[in-house]
Image (tube, rainbow, N blue to C red):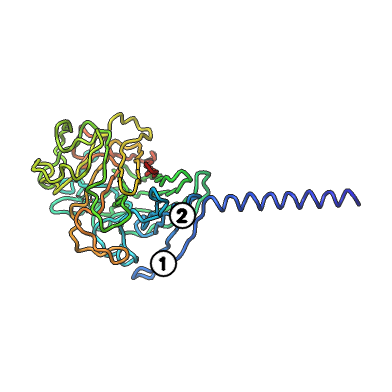
């Protein structure tokens, strides 16, 4: 009799303990899923919300594997959205600014959309003047990915998968790509890419959030302070195609090797800034070794928000929102004016398939493409 009472007590204690552990896990990170909308073909598009123990919240949709909002605390503990975007799915379907999306297969431009791979010429969709930009007309940002919650010891995690078929936008090979977003309890938004191909091809995806750390998407980003760990950048021609040259940032407005206010030199008559209508260039990251390194930091003094960028990629495209011109209405009916958001897109250098001195973006059958990029938030 006593023995069975003891057994029941032990079982009850174990049950209570396991419940307590579960609740504890649930209170540190959470994921919820809801319907965002439907595409014209009837496909349902989901929205996942990831929350961490300090209340940071990232919402990501299956359409374009797009980060829709990112609520981060300021120095007074006030949570505000620090990325541009739209209120509804329709905005993302119609929009042309790549807000928050995964872009690819090739982030940034390929001159005239042409490249040669193993002796064969390929012609990609032309969708930016005479060039190919961000994967073409229906790049990774304009397709429906499949999202699923996954287990992660680091925080709330959602995996997005997409099968890009042979010939899509002119690219060879069928690519199976997954992108995992994890919101860690250290206030990091971690993005892990993985892809394989059934035929040798090129691949260079990136993430295209427009950040505004003031938390008020009506403000410009000109008072943000930026540091990029790079001594060189890749100059462009007037159609924004890299020339192949690596130029020193020293003594030019391109120098962010020491923290600088973005607005300080943005309107100077330096030819590269005239071509880009502001900053729209790739920086050649120092000490690239294939490991995840701290490569850039962005600080906004009024909110105290600091965002560090860590990546295993060789380059970062800093785009200062120069094409935003007040014609786009975003979340909460806010009109997105000139330079109200900036992108820090980790990637290989633009037009690298045509620049043999740039790191290669070739993905061979049997190999796996990997990228990890982290946007880490704190208060300074
Ligand atoms: C990138 C490009 C810019 C522009 C934006 C999207 O960052 O470098 O030139 O095309 O995307 O508008």
In front of the other: 289 or 202: 289
Q: Is residue 203 visible?
A: no
Q: Return the residue at label 2.
A: 50
Estimate the x, y position of residue 334 in percent, counting from the top left: 27, 64
Say which quarter of the image contains residue 361: top left
Estimate the x, y position of residue 160 in percent, counting from the top left: 42, 53
Q: Return the residue at label 1.
A: 44
Query: What SS does tag 2 mark?
Result: strand
Estimate the x, y position of residue 283 in percent, counting from the top left: 23, 37
Say which quarter of the image contains residue 129: bottom left
Left or right of 52 on screen, residue 373: left
Q: In which quarter of the image is the C terminus?
A: top left
For residue 63, the mark is: none
Say which quarter of the image contains residue 331: bottom left
Query: What SS does tag 1 mark?
Result: strand
| Residue lying at the far right of the rendered structure | 1
Q: Is mark 2 within 8 Å of ligand 1?
A: no
Left or right of 339 on screen, residue 102: right
């Amino acid at each position: 009799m006593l023995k069975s009472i003891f057994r029941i007590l032990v079982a009850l204690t174990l049950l209570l303990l396991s419940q307590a552990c579960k609740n504890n896990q649930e209170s540190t990170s959470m994921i919820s899923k809801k319907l965002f909308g439907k595409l014209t073909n009837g496909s349902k598009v989901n929205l996942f919300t990831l929350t961490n123990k300090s209340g940071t919240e990232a919402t990501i949709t299956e359409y374009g594997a797009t980060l829709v909002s990112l609520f981060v605390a300021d120095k007074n503990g006030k949570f505000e959205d620090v990325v541009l975007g739209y209120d509804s799915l329709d905005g993302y379907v119609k929009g042309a600014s790549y807000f928050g999306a995964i872009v690819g297969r090739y982030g940034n431009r390929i001159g005239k959309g042409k490249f040669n791979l193993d002796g064969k010429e390929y012609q990609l969709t032309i969708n930016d003047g005479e060039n190919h930009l961000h994967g073409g007309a229906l790049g990774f940002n304009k397709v429906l990915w499949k999202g699923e919650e996954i287990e992660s010891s680091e925080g709330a995690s959602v995996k997005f998968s997409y099968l890009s078929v042979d010939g899509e936008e002119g690219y060879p090979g069928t690519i199976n790509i997954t992108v995992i977003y994890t919101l860690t309890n250290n206030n990091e938004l971690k993005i892990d890419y993985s892809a394989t191909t059934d035929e040798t091809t090129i691949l260079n995806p990136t993430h295209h959030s427009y950040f505004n750390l003031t938390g008020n998407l009506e403000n410009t980003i000109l008072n943000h302070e930026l540091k990029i760990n790079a001594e060189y950048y890749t100059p462009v021609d007037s159609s924004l195609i890299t020339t192949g040259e690596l130029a020193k940032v020293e003594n030019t407005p391109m120098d962010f090797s020491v923290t600088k206010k973005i607005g300080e030199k943005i309107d100077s008559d330096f030819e590269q800034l005239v071509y880009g209508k502001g900053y729209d260039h790739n920086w050649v990251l120092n000490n690239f070794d294939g490991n995840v390194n701290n490569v850039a930091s962005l600080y906004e003094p009024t909110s105290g928000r600091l965002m560090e960028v860590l990546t295993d990629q060789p380059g970062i495209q800093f785009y200062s929102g120069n094409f935003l011109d007040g014609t786009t209405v975003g979340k909460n009916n806010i009109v997105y004016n000139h330079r109200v958001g900036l992108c820090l897109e980790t990637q290989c250098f633009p037009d690298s398939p045509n620049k043999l001195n740039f790191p290669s973006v070739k993905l061979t059958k049997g190999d796996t493409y990997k990228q990890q990029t982290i946007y880490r938030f704190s208060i300074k």
